[in-house]
Image (cartoon, rainbow, N blue to C red):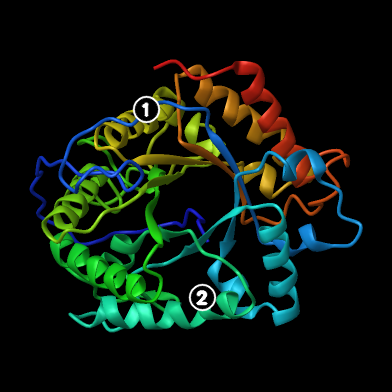
Amino acid sequence: MNKLPVFHSMGAFLFAAIALHVGSTTDGVAAGEDRPQRFTKPEVWLCTARIFDLTRPDARWDYVRTRLTGIQLYIDKVNKAPAENLQKLAAVVRANNLKVSVECGGTLGFAPLDARNGESSARIELAKLDKWRRAGGRIDYLNLDGPVRRLLYPRRGKKRGAGFTSIEDCANELMDYIRAVKAVYPGIRFFLLTNFPNWGYRGRTSYHARGPKQQDWGDYDIVIRTVLKTAKEQGIRLAGVTVDNPYEYAVGEHFSVKLERPDKTDWLRRVRAYEEFARTRGLEFNLIINSEKGGKTSDRAFYERTLRMLDAYVRVGGKPTRYIVQSWYKFPETIVPETAPYSMTALVKAVMEKLAAAGPPRP
C-alpha cells in the first residue's frame, strides 16, 4: 500500500538529468511525441481495502455507482480474497460498467535483484492477478507503486538490502516487467505511482529532508525522465502517473524529521508542477486524495480532511485526469451506504458534488 515510511541514511547516487518526450496511450500519440493532454472533467475513482462491502445485499450507493468511473483494487487483497467475494465484485463491475485498476508493486525488491527482476516480478504478480481474472474480473490498468524505489532500496524482511545503483537499470527491469504483463494482458495500461513527499523534486528537498542532498530517495524529476526516456527507446507507452501525497503532507501539517517549518514550503505547487510536466508529455495525471491523520482517527476526520485536500488542490489550479479517493488506513470503517454520515461512499459522493459545482476545469 502507499504508506509513507520513515527512512534513515542511504547511499548517494550520481544522477544525470535527461530531457525527453513521451507519448500518451490515450490519444494514439506515438512514444516520444510531445502533445499536451486536453482538459476534461476529472474522473472519480474509489479505492479501499474494504472494497467487497460494495457487494453486500444491503449496500446502497446508487448516486455514486451511476457516476463512478472505476475502482482500484489492492493486489494482495485480490490474492487473499475468497473466490466467491471476487466473483461478486466482478459482477458489480460488469453491471455498472466500471473500469478497474489494480495497485501493485511492479518490479519487486524481494525478486532477484539482477537482470531477471522484471520477468520474475511479473510472474509473481501475474499469479495473483489471475485469481481476479478467473473470477470474471477485468483489468484496465496496473498502478505500479514505486517500482524504481523498490529496486534502489529493496527490503528483506525488516531490513533494507543492497539494491540497484543505477536508475537506468531499474528502468530497464521495469520495461521487462511491462512486456511480460502485456504478453498475458495485451490491452492493459500502466500508471507509475510515487510517494511524492519522500522524494526531492527538481533539486529541492524532500518532505523529511534526509539523506544525500536532503532528498531521501533522490530527485524524482530525474527518475521520471529516465523512465520515460527508457520507455521511448524501447517503444513502450505509459498511460500516466499517479501521486500519493496525503493532505497533511500537501499543506505542511505533518511533522518533518529535518524541516522545522514544513508549512513554509508550497508542497501543493510542487505537485502541480509535476502535473504540468505530465500533461506536456501527453500523460494522464492521477491524484490520490486522502488524509493520514483522518485515516488514523475516525470516519469523520477522514471525510472532512480529504475534502479539504480536494478544495486545496482545486484552489491551486489542479486539473487531474482522475481523483482516486483512497484509504489504506483503519478509517473509514463504514463503506456503505452513501447516506451514512462520513462513509466512504458518502465521501465519494461529496467529491463528485464539489467537482460538479465547480464546473469544467480551465485550460
Circle 1: element type: loop
Q: Amino acid at mark 1?
A: Arg
Q: Residue at x 52, y 28 (%)?
A: 41
Q: Is residue 232 visible?
A: yes
The residue positioned farthest toward the right in the image shown: 58
Q: Residue at x 35, y 59 (%)?
A: 8
Quarter holding the C terminus is top left
Image position of 16 (left or right of 55): left
Between marks 1 and 2 in the image, the one whose residue lies nearer the viewer:
1
Q: Amino acid at mark 2?
A: Leu
Image position of 147 (left or right of 84): left
Return the mark for residue 129: 2
Q: Is residue 50 visible?
A: no
* Label 1 vs 2, first from the N-terminus: 1
Query: Dot 1: within a 10 Å radius of its alpha carbon, few (fewer than 14), some, or many (20 or more) residues?
Result: few
Above-or-below relation of 280 to 52: above
Above-or-below relation of 134 to 193: below
Image position of 61 (left or right of 362): right
Which image quadrant is residue 159 in? bottom left
Return the mark for residue 38: 1
> Is disc 1 in contact with disc 2, using a CB cutoff of under 8 Å?
no
Q: Position of residue 347 (x, y in %)?
A: 73, 38
Image position of 45 (left or right of 171): right
